[in-house]
Amino acid sequence: MKDITQFFKAKKNGEKLTLISTYDYWSAKLCEEAGIDAILVGDSLGMVVQGNDSTLPVTLEEMIYHTKAVRKGAPNTFIIVDMPFMTYHTTVEEAVKNAGRVIKETGANAVKIEGASEIVLETTRRLTSIGVPVMGHLGLTPQFINIFGGYKVQGKTEESQQKIIQQAKELETVGAFSVVLEAVPSDLAKTITTNLKIPTIGIGAGKETDGQILVFHDLIGIFEKTPKFVKRYLEGGKLIKQSLEKFKEEVKNGQFPTEEHSY
């Protein structure tokens, strides 16, 4: 099984890391077969799988459920799990307990926590001290959507840029093994990447980060609309819809099933 050292080796050797965010057995299996470096079981499942308009409703139990399925599909891939909203925000003790459940019950390798508040920094320090690797997440942090007032690019002013740079340094200091930079200017992402010893993973942060992550369903074009930073490598949604329409047509006119498909 790939482990945390792959992140540090990649940073040292200038090798770009590839991560995919996905939520089930079959997509995780395809990711492993394709040689993707790591999988993030993101709380974005609240939007992609459940149809919510944010990640906030996702529960710890739902994250555990989906991660178990992902682990079955990708038994030899490094798996990171998002800690959902309100599972690490009240006390460090509760955060450690919840993260411990994720690792024990799913077989995942690490957790991801958004932001760099005092409780997040102390939680990161505590978790790494007991053997739970923590990935940070800065910039557009979806669990703060009600504060940001929408899914907006962060770090556009000098003041906000300096704040994100400082947060990244603090996360590194308390033991985070990497940090996701989401929806920030590419120059800011480059500065952070250059000044950290731990790898940065970009999503809408330009090409100068140490790695890139996309949501599986965005990458294969399941939905009609995707964010600006997404490159669609396949128009999967259109192909699937065409297949469903063809199935309906053949059943209606008696073309399916044939003798070939009968016992």
Image: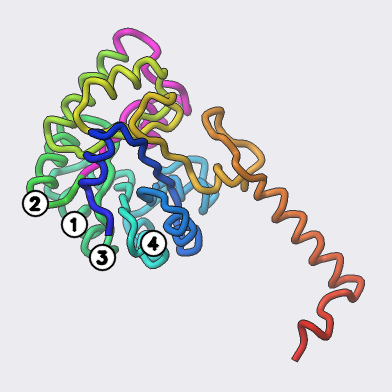
Disc 2 target residue: 130
Examine the image and state in which quarter residue 144 appears: top left
Disc 3 target residue: 105
Location of residue 66 with respect to 5 vertically, above or below: below
Residue that appears at 27% across and 32% down: 115
Q: CA distance from mark 4 to mark 3?
A: 16 Å
Mark 1 near mark 2, Cβ–Cβ under 8 Å?
yes
Q: Residues within 10 Å of mark 4 (few under 14, many from 20)?
A: many
Residue that appears at 60% across and 42% down: 233
- Secondary-structure class at tag 4: loop
Location of residue 189 with respect to 75 vertically, above or below: above
Amino acid under label 1? Gly
Q: Residues within 10 Å of mark 1 (few under 14, many from 20)?
A: some
Q: CA distance from mark 1 to mark 4?
A: 21 Å
Q: Is residue 148 magenta?
A: yes
Q: Residues within 10 Å of mark 2 (few under 14, many from 20)?
A: few
Which tag is nearer the camera, tag 4 or tag 2?
A: 4
Residue that appears at 36% across and 17% down: 155
Q: Is residue 58 magenta?
A: no
The region drawn magenta spans: 134-160
Q: Is residue 158 visible?
A: yes
Residue 74: image tag: 4
Of the residues under marks 4 and 3, which one precedes in the sequence?
Answer: 4
Please state which of residues 11 and 124 is positioned toward the viewer in this rendering.
11
Q: Quadrant of the N terminus?
A: bottom left
Amino acid under label 2? Ile
- Secondary-structure class at tag 2: loop
